[in-house]
Amino acid sequence: MNEIKTLADQLREKIRSGESEDILPEKKSPLTESIPLTKPKKPPKPVISDTQAIAFFTALEAFRLEGTEKSLIRLDSKTMNLLKRIKLAKGIDMNRFIVYSLHQYIAQHPWLSAYIQETLKNSEL
């Protein structure tokens, strides 16, 4: 009866005797082979010259905010903190910054207004 051993007993003996390498072969899954072990490097931060910053804030201060409509928007905390810091650093109102940014975005994408108008014409409301 001493010679009848369970598989667990056999494994324990092999581990103790140093033969543990050939007990269980390592299985590599295809997922773990393709995942790199090092973290990818972040791209370097762009270098902004003082002239760019001065030109931006000058244009922002010169922007005339002529809004009569009110709108409630939702912002994430990171964006809200940035807007608060701009208010503290430069004295620029959050609304002015948001409206200026929207005007700049629409100016950079002139096709957007025409696309929206065309979509509204073709829709059946």
Image (cartoon, grey):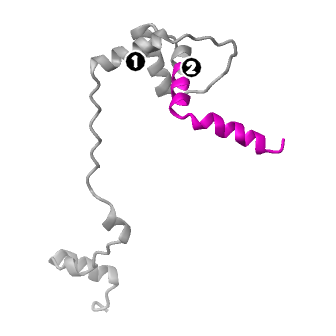
Residue 88 image position (x, y, % from top left): 42, 9
Q: Is residue 90 left or right of residue 27?
A: right
Q: 69 above or below 47?
A: above
Q: Which residue sits at x=34%, y=14%?
A: 54
User: Disc 2 designates what residue?
Assistant: 99
> Left of 59 or right of it: where is 36?
left
Q: CA distance from mark 1 to mark 2?
A: 14 Å
User: Disc number at residue 56?
Assistant: 1
Which stretch appears magenta? 99-125
Magenta span: chief secondary structure: helix
Earlier along the polypeptide chain: callout 1 or callout 2?
Answer: 1
For residue 57, what is the image quadrant? top left
x and y, in percent, of residue 78 in the image: 46, 27
Quadrant position of the C terminus in the picture:
top right
Is 28 drawn above or below residue 109 in the view shown? below
Q: Nearer the viewer, residue 73 or 15?
A: 73
**Amino acid type of the residue tagged 1 in the rendering:** Phe
Query: Could you tell me residue 107's position as x and y percent?
Result: 53, 28
